[in-house]
Amino acid sequence: GQAKEEEKPETPEQRRVRELVEEGMRCLSGINNTKIDLNKAMDSFTQASALGSLRAKSYMGEMYKHGKGVDVDIDKARELFTIAAAGGDAAAQRNLAFLYASGIGMEEDRMRAILYYHFAATGNDHLAQLAMGYRHMYGVDVPKNCQAAVEYYLPAAEAVVREVQQFRPPPMMERHALASEGSKPRPSDQDEDVVDYYQYSAARGDASAQVALGQLHYFGARGLEQDYGEALRWYEKAGEQGDGNALGHMGNMYVQGIHVKASNETALRLFKKGVEKGNPVAINGLGYMHMYGMGVDQSFSEAMKLFSQAAEQGNQEARFNLGAMYITGLGVTKDYAKAIYYFTLAANRGHMLALYNLAMMHLNGFGTPRSCNNALQFIKSVAERGSWGLRLQDAYKLYRAGEVDYALLLYSEAAELGYEVAQGNVAHIYDEGGSKMTTDSKRKALAAYEISAQQGAVGADLKIGDFYYYGMGTEVNYRKAVTHYRAASEARNAQAMFNLAYMHEHGIGLPQDLHLAKRFYDMAAETSQDAVWPVALCRTKLLLSMAVTEFVEYVDQVSLRLSTQYGPKYGIWLPPSTVWLPWLEQQWDLILIAILVCQLSFVLLLRSHMSAARLAQPARR
């Protein structure tokens, strides 16, 4: 065969460009212990751009788009993205697609957005792959196609899995739904209270609080930055007190070489001490070392025994490991059904590798009927756990800091990638009129609610119903309002039930049916305690209406009977309610005044007679 073509050596100019881009990335993101310096990042990218770097132009566009170190300038960002995209830079193509899809700072063009997303996804841009996978999954601007969605999601999901397999656990992703917070304490305030409590208790020597604080630092949860060093420090403090969880977590860090030099000897010592205390984390860790022969003789049977013990205590890693042994046949007879069972148990607790393996088994029909739709749900869940999901937390921090437009940009990007919570938050910001980036906020809010509802968001269906009922961002359409209220009602939403009851009561978009109205009011009260008092008032009014209706029907029956019996003989015909009821409804105010005047006259006359009677009585001596 032909010899492989040798790669051309890097020229001094190419090396200079690469160094400038890498320096800019370090200063922009603070990676490799570099202090974030946005001015220096922009300067490095500008120099690299002048030397022809398309990637540098793309990064500069990102900085202008999000206002990092410079004022937000969407026009400048679009100009840079356009140049870089024309040269084939996938990140620039994806950013240009986002601008066209969202209509932020430019005219919306969804077909052109699809084109650029496709080019970027083909160029292995993982964010563009998520965007196209989501679109094919739900048929958003493209044909709905499960297989195509899986093919787009798969490379991004595999990248996430590779990160985990290299013992680099992703940071915890906390998803805050803005619409559900209302007047409740802010999650950020609650997070601060939780962290303060753990820090106070940990400082006083509470081992369980020290482990909890270590976990928060390890995963970067509750508003804390991911910090393995700080996590290890708290694990060590708890470990000195003999806490089994701390010993197990420290053993995992030593066996995987996370923030410390990998040491099988240290890991084995820590795991054994944890096993003596019956800790499932340590039991699983010791099983892991036996499975791979790390510091001990390799023994699949011993690994199986230890994993089973830990799994019985609910350890998700042990459940995953049991699934892995059954799917590969390590020390046991290969059994896909048992593998699916254990992977499912782990996946229910959010285990990423278990989710990925379930996706592959459903996709290929291993131990279960082939199901593209099931595989797609699992693979989407894995792909969304990449570091790009941190946009949600960054956006939330900006929103709480009052930087609504900056938050909207990040939420809009995440919404394009298919994150349902981001779609709901974009809709909420537009609905509340909190952004200055558009004058067509209600129409955009409705569009965001509709794509959120596609993913099963009950609150979104309720909101869409309101938009069609009141004609916000669209024309009034009671039929569509009823459709969405029903969808939310079937998901046990009390407000939707209340709305359907009201529409049945007044015959708005639905046939007037007081009995059905009462049924929906009752359902709303049974579903939510908050609906009890409003429903009680409406139900009282409804019962009065039903009583009046029954009275009118009774009067009509009597009138008809009397007219039939005496009309021909005496020429007296009593009119039906259709004649006199509209007149009463039009003249109700005059009739009410007349009744009040009569009552007042009666009271005055009665008082006059009572006064005259008292004067007529002989005075007492």
Image: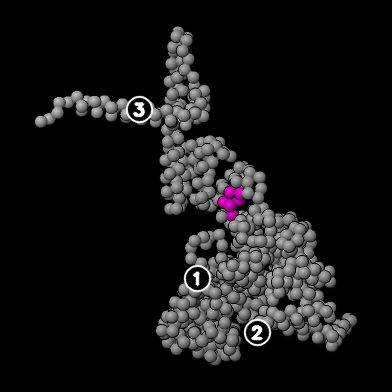
Instruction: Please state if 384 lies on the left or on the right of 73 as rendered.
Output: left
Q: Which residue is mark 1?
A: 189
- Tell me where the magenta segment starts and ends, as one range: 460-467
- The answer to which of marks 2 and 1 sits earlier in the sequence is 2
Instruction: Please state if 528 lies on the left or on the right of 146 as rendered.
Output: left
- Residue 582, how many percent across, how many down? 52, 27
Q: Which residue is mark 3?
A: 601
Q: Is residue 4 magenta?
A: no
Tell me which residue sits at (81%, 86%) in the image. Answer: 15
- Residue 281, how many percent across, how many down? 50, 79
Q: Which quarter of the rendered picture does the N terminus lie within?
A: bottom right
Q: Amino acid at mark 1?
A: Asp
**Cα distance in 3D space between marks 3 and 1:** 64 Å
Q: Which quarter of the rendered picture does the C terminus lie within?
A: top left
Q: How is the image coloured?
A: one colour
In this rendering, the answer to whether 28 lies above or below 359 is below
Q: Nearer the viewer, residue 246 or 75?
A: 75
- Secondary structure at badge 2 equals loop
